[in-house]
Amino acid sequence: MNKKRILYVEDDETLAFLTADNLEQYFDVVHCSNGSAAFELFCKEVFDLCVLDIMLPDMDGFEIATEIRKRNKEIPIIFLSAKTMKEDRIKGLKLGADDYLVKPYSIEELILKIEIFLNRSQKNIEKSKMTYILGSFEFEFENYSLKNDKKQITLTEREASLLKLFLDNVNTVLKREKILTSLWGNDDYFSGRSLDVFISRLRKILKEEASVKIENIPRVGFKMVID
């Protein structure tokens, strides 16, 4: 079985050697010692998880994570840091990290965390390949395809992601802020206006499907109802 590929970014040579040596027993580890090189590598190659030190030359771990999340919202990210400040931990998690380990950390704990997040990521991938049923339509998220006996529609990536979010939360109120941060990464004015446009597009596509509705919940958000 192919080993999962880990991008490991750490500028301390001794710590990097010891950590990578242990991780390589279980994973395919690619080590970088500075931030800009790591991000350049991330853009060129495929990884299953990122382990990022925060204090790095050239480009710190927070900056790398911010850029990674612009391109990939799903890949697990684990921060490593000598910083114990609660504010740093909160900042890391707000940037989309899955966990934050404080140095000196246990190699066993790091390996366990990696395995947990890789398993969760794999389940999310498998879930994304599912076919959803909404009325007479079948929706294949992986292919952005929405089809029934009469027509087939290819959605945009954002439309497909929005529809999947609704279908994963049928009959549940989704706050605008949750939708915006999940799909756009922020909840500013312009993202909010974009969301309204995409909601209108989905409603137009599904208007002939009487059993499917996207309801406005005033001053809160939206709810997809499927009878």
Image: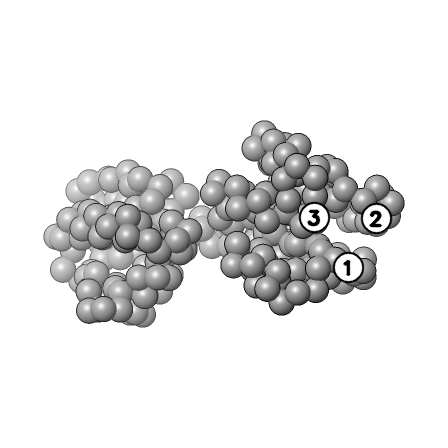
Between 111 and 147, the one nearer to me in the picture: 111
Between 224 and 31, the one nearer to me in the picture: 31
In three-dimensional space, the C-alpha distance between marks 3 and 1, rounded to whole angstroms, equals 12 Å
Q: Is residue 75 above or below residue 169?
A: above
Residue 167 in view (yes/no): no
Displayed quadrant of residue 92: bottom right
Closer to the N terminus: mark 2 or mark 1?
2
Instruction: Give the foreground label among 2 and 3.
Output: 3
Q: Secondary structure at mark 2?
A: helix
Q: Which residue is mark 1?
A: 103
Crowding around mark 3 (Cα neighbors within 10 Å: few <14, some 14 to 19, many 20+) is some
Q: Secondary structure at mark 3?
A: loop
Q: Which residue is mark 3?
A: 55
Q: Which disc is residue 28 wearing? A: none
Q: Amino acid at mark 2?
A: Leu
Closer to the N terminus: mark 3 or mark 1?
3
Quarter of the image that includes the C terminus: bottom left
Confirm or deny contact between disc 2 and disc 1 (CB under 8 A): yes
User: Residue 108: image x %, image y %?
Assistant: 80, 61
Between 30 and 35, the one nearer to me in the picture: 35
Residue 212 in view (yes/no): yes
Looking at the image, residue 227 sits to the left or right of residue 113; the answer is left
Crowding around mark 1 (Cα neighbors within 10 Å: few <14, some 14 to 19, many 20+) is few
Instruction: Give the foreground label among 3 and 1.
Output: 3
Crowding around mark 2 (Cα neighbors within 10 Å: few <14, some 14 to 19, many 20+) is few
Between 41 and 11, the one nearer to me in the picture: 11
Looking at the image, which residue is at 24% across and 39% down?
Answer: 152
Q: Is residue 152 above or below residue 124?
A: above
Q: Which residue is mark 2?
A: 15
